[in-house]
Amino acid sequence: MIRPNRRSVAAALLAGGGHVGALLALFETLEYTTVEATPLLGLFALLAFVQGAVPVLVSAHTRLLAPASGLVALFSGVVAVELSGAGDSALLEMYVMSIVTGLTGGFVVFAGVLEFAIRQGYRLGAGRLRNLPPLPGDDSSRRVAVGSAGLVGLPAGVLGFFFGGPVIALLVLVLVLATVAAAVPLLALLRGGFVSPLVPFAIVVPYVLYGHAFYMTEVSGMGLLLLGPAAVLSALAWKIERAVRSRIGGRDGTAFADRSDCG
């Protein structure tokens, strides 16, 4: 992959700095003091910078829309609710925890991976994308899916760590469940352009992870185990869609359907 040019890097640096500055201004406006201690604030600022810069760098370098627009939409929603007085700092707490764990950056970059697979495979504006590899073949699609799913799994594991209990066991279990829950729909997409497995993922996984970040002081963390059923539902959706498509001759001339094995 070609290295990012100076314009992309500059955009990323500005976005990272702007993200940190906007958060600090919001802290001041709302008198938010959870990360007020200097060492904590410095670490948080670094994490916020990275998770503001990386999605914008990915979008600027590849012309994928999801990473940068996802970050902007999420942060803008938090700001709008909190400044309206309706959030009572609760949404800000959730957003802060999503930065600390890496959920925000992980989710929006993973959304970019999904966008790439859909646009490249179904020829949806693929000509406008830049500096991206071809879709992986069936031999490498599993490795790509699991590696990319780590963008969701690793932050989920960190979130599990914050709930205490049998720390290592919960961290590993949540990491594995979240990785599988993200890998199954991506693998289905890469193997044959199957899109129905994305529905359980989109409904369950963000809700569970952001919900636990939101209600961290009020829940036990066992709800994170719902990531397992999400993976099962995605796998079932994959099987059903494959069966339906096989009945109606589901090869449609796209890069996905040109493969000899659609799943």
Image (cartoon, rainbow, N blue to C red):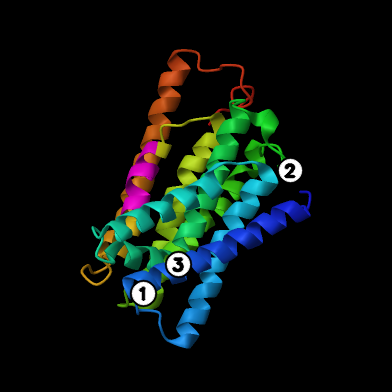
Evaluate if marks 3 and 2 touch, with contact meaning CB atoms under 8 Å apart.
no
Q: From the viewer's perspective, is 4 left or right of 88?
A: right
Mark 2 residue type: Asn
Residue position for label 2: 131
**From which residue to which does the magenta span run?**
199-207
Residue position for label 1: 162
Residue 237 percent across, percent down from the top left: 38, 33
First in sequence: mark 3 or mark 2? 3
Evaluate if marks 2 and 1 touch, with contact meaning CB atoms under 8 Å apart.
no
Measured Cα–Cα span from mark 3 to mark 2? 31 Å
Of helix, strand and loop, which one carries label 1? helix
Binning the other alpha carbons within 10 Å of mark 1 as few (below 14), some (14 to 19) or many (20 upward) gives some
Residue position for label 3: 23
In the rendered view, tell whether residue 97 sits above or below residue 38.
above
Measured Cα–Cα span from mark 1 to mark 3? 22 Å
Q: Would you say residue 202 sits in the magenta stretch?
A: yes
User: In the current view of this chain or complex, which residue is farthest to the left?
Assistant: 218
Can you tell which of label 2 and label 1 is closer to the viewer? 2
Residue 184 percent across, percent down from the top left: 46, 44
The residue drawn where x is 47% and y is 87% is 38
Residue 112 percent across, percent down from the top left: 56, 45
Mark 3 residue type: Leu
In the rendered view, tell whether residue 250 sits above or below residue 18.
above
**Residue 252 in view:** yes
Measured Cα–Cα span from mark 2 to mark 1? 37 Å
Q: Would you say residue 101 sits in the magenta stretch?
A: no
From the viewer's side, name the closer residue of 189 and 119.
Answer: 119
Q: Main secondary structure of the magenta part?
A: helix
